Amino acid sequence: MTLLIKNVTKRFGNHTAVNNLSLEIPEKEMFGFLGGNGAGKTTTFRMILGLLDPSDGEISWNGQSISYDKSHLIGYLPEERGLYPKLKVRDQIVYLGKLRGMKKNDIISELEAWLQRFKVPEYIDKKVEELSKGNQQKIQFISAVIHKPKLLIMDEPFSGLDPINVEMLKEAVVDLKERGTSIIFSSHQMDHVEELCEHLCILQKGKQIVHGSLRDIKSSYGKKNLIVLGDMDLNYLRNFDGVTKYRPITGGCELQIDNEQAAQTIFESLQGRGFIRKFDLEEPTLNDIFIEKVGASYE
Ligand SMILES: Nc1ncnc2c1ncn2[C@@H]1O[C@H](COP(=O)(O)OP(=O)(O)OP(=O)(O)O)[C@@H](O)[C@H]1O
């Protein structure tokens, strides 16, 4: 089961929101779909859901053209939440489940299992408006997966959740992936993407500017981060050969260097200046890469 997006463009009048996008999202994969504000992510999701037609190109699921009547294969957790505040959780989910062709008994037993898993079985008889924002988010998630979709699209699924609920939801999502669900995950929180996704793309102004495996994207980036903590003045590293960024932090500095050899030279230069508490060479973060790539194309 593969979602294939082939040369897809979407124009609104003379504005191109998505520009010749091609992607493949295989089964059992959580794919990071990233981009700055207005990059074209929601427009792409709406095309996958069959709510918008592409101006050019094709979207197919397992070799068949995608359309609104296949939307029962897809679960969508949109960024803007859409539950009915006055309805009880049970009635809400039964209504949504029936829209996707499920029987009432199956919906209730699936809902009870999810509420149990999220440690809130008593919510079944509560009105949505009685729940906190984070707990409404759990119900919204359940509404997106109640019909066991083959493809799940999640836009900022962790926003508004406390760290314990973030972990609970992450575990649920990883379980779905391992049971064969393809997942498209969009977020501005790069640390979550880094933790969960093996492959990703970054869109900017509708165009794909980065695409590939997280590992390859990081290794081809070339730059690394160096953390230095010590009892000495490190300000001289600001203009040191090979240092492309300097950021003071408590007890030292964080550097971006453009080659590993620079770390060796910096280490040698520290000798005799004072006590070194930490000297740590790290891979670039996805956040570093996003800021540089998206920032560069803003200019
Ligand atoms: N129905 C529409 N009519 C005209 N322009 C639109 C329409 N929908 C989206 N756009 C434009 O298309 C571009 C992409 O919007 P989209 O909502 O897909 O971005 P996004 O990546 O989801 O952004 P964000 O992260 O801010 O939610 C924007 O410039 C937006 O103004």
Image: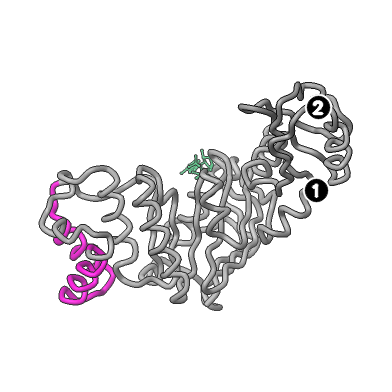
Residue 214, image x and y in percent?
A: 66, 57
Element on which disc 2 rests: helix
Q: Badge 2: few (under 14), some or many (20 or more) residues near its Cα, within 10 Å?
A: some
The structure residue drawn at horizontal position 17% and vertical position 44%, both measured from the top left corner, is 129
The residue at which mark 1 appears reads as 222
Between 135 and 294, the residue placed more toward the observer is 135
Q: Main secondary structure of the magenta part?
A: helix
The residue at which mark 2 appears reads as 237
> Looking at the picture, does residue 240 appear above or below residue 16?
above
In this picture, residue 119 sits left or right of residue 178:
left
The structure residue drawn at horizontal position 34% and vertical position 65%, both measured from the top left corner, is 145
The structure residue drawn at horizontal position 62% and vertical position 61%, both measured from the top left corner, is 199
Q: Image quadrant of residue 245? A: top right
Q: Badge 1: few (under 14), some or many (20 or more) residues near its Cα, within 10 Å?
A: few
Mark toward the start of the polypeptide (1 vs 2): 1
Magenta stretch bounds: 86-115
Residue type pointed to by label 2: Leu
Residue type pointed to by label 1: Gly
Residue 101, image x and y in percent?
A: 26, 74
